[in-house]
Image (cartoon, helix red, strand yellow):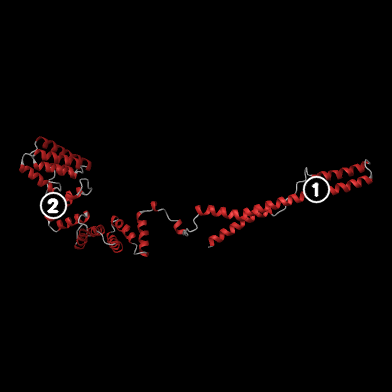
Amino acid sequence: MMLWFVFALMTVAAIFAVLWPLSRGSRPQNDGSEAAVYKDQLSEIDRDVSAGLTGTSEAEAARVEISRRLLAAADNQRDRLSGSNIRLRRVAAAIALVGLPVIAVAFYYPLGSPGLGDFPLAQRDRTPAATQPLDDLVAQVEQHLEKNPSDGRGWDVLAPVLARLGRYDAAITAFRNSITYNGDSAGRRADLGEALVAAAGGVVTAEAKAELERAVALNADDVKASYFLGLAAEQDGRSADAASIWRAMLAKAPPNAPWRPLVQAALVRVAGSPVPALSDEAVAAAKDMKETDRSAMIRGMVDRLATRLKQNGDDVEGWLRLVNAYMVMGDPDKAKAALTDARQAVARDPERLRQLNEGLKNLGLDG
């Protein structure tokens, strides 16, 4: 309401500024007009009388006639100017009273924002979010959630950020609140289980296992929950169960799944699947190497193994090492090619083919 009152005052001031000059009378122009001619004639008669060129009686008669004409001309000019000014003022007043408000509203509605709320000064001075440190943003979200604890979306956003920051206890609370206000889901239960594992230093506690089992009950294919349940089995000493869980994950996974190397490494750990071995001398030398040199040495060993297998393809154990090495190194295309070559090499030997397929199953690949 106050906004429209201010606009009304501004409109009145604008109209007054337009009408004020029009309310003042204009001075008629005398130069070249009929009245100016008559005035010149009166002056000329006075000069003639002074010079003795005209008699007094004739001059007086001429003055009377010229004065009459001068008065008539002045009346006519005043009438014309008055009529013209009145019409002009009426048009200007109509434009000022009606046109200005209409034009102002026509411009304001598409460009202005009459319904926009106030923008507090504290928020105007606030640093843009893109340039703020993550801790400051988290603190702002936490303050918001203290005032609005039922904001499920806020808890959903905050929980994983707290986990990445290593604030596991706060993350656990946030994940629980997210489940409370957003509803139960496999993803939220798995995230909560992972936070509980992280808070326990990597140990899958009974509480974490319960959350992970709830996640699998909601979605049997949840990758995170399945992996940690396999880890729980490994920590409990049930290596066969852990291997079974991880093999099932790898069997369902696409070849380019980003988590595939992690699960394969875990499967190797519990199932004893062979990996490229280093001699004692090589292990001792590798300890003092830089990471890039160590990686180059391992890749050289893998290349030498691949060359040897091309010359002697009967080594099933060697083929399994080669395929697994390529998968661990993140090179699935070479792993597929090695798998194809291995099957072709032992295709005529049923026993070796069976051993190869069994070993591929242990690696989580199709046998």
> In percent of the image, x 78 and y 49: which residue is there?
76
Q: Position of residue 147 (x, y in %)?
A: 37, 64
Query: In the image shown, does 223 or 166 lie closer to the viewer?
Result: 223
Check disc 2 and give the amino acid type.
Answer: Val
Callout in the foreground (1, 2): 1
> In this rendering, does residue 339 appear at all?
yes
Mark 2 is surrounded, within 10 Å at the Cα level, by few (under 14), some (14 to 19) or many (20 or more) other residues, namely some
Check disc 1 and give the amino acid type.
Answer: Ala
Q: Position of residue 359 (x, y in %)?
A: 10, 46
Q: Position of residue 93 (x, y in %)?
A: 65, 54
- The numbered dot on residue 223 is none
Which of marks 2 and 1 precedes in the sequence?
1
Q: Is 306 placed left or right of 109 in the picture? A: left
Q: What residue is disc 2 on?
A: 270
Q: Is 331 placed left or right of 109 in the picture? A: left
- The numbered dot on residue 73 is 1
In terms of secondary structure, where does tag 2 sit? helix
Query: In the image shown, does 238 or 31 lie closer to the viewer?
Result: 31
Indicate whether 308 appears above or below 205: above
Give the quarter of the image for residue 13: bottom right
Q: How many marks?
A: 2
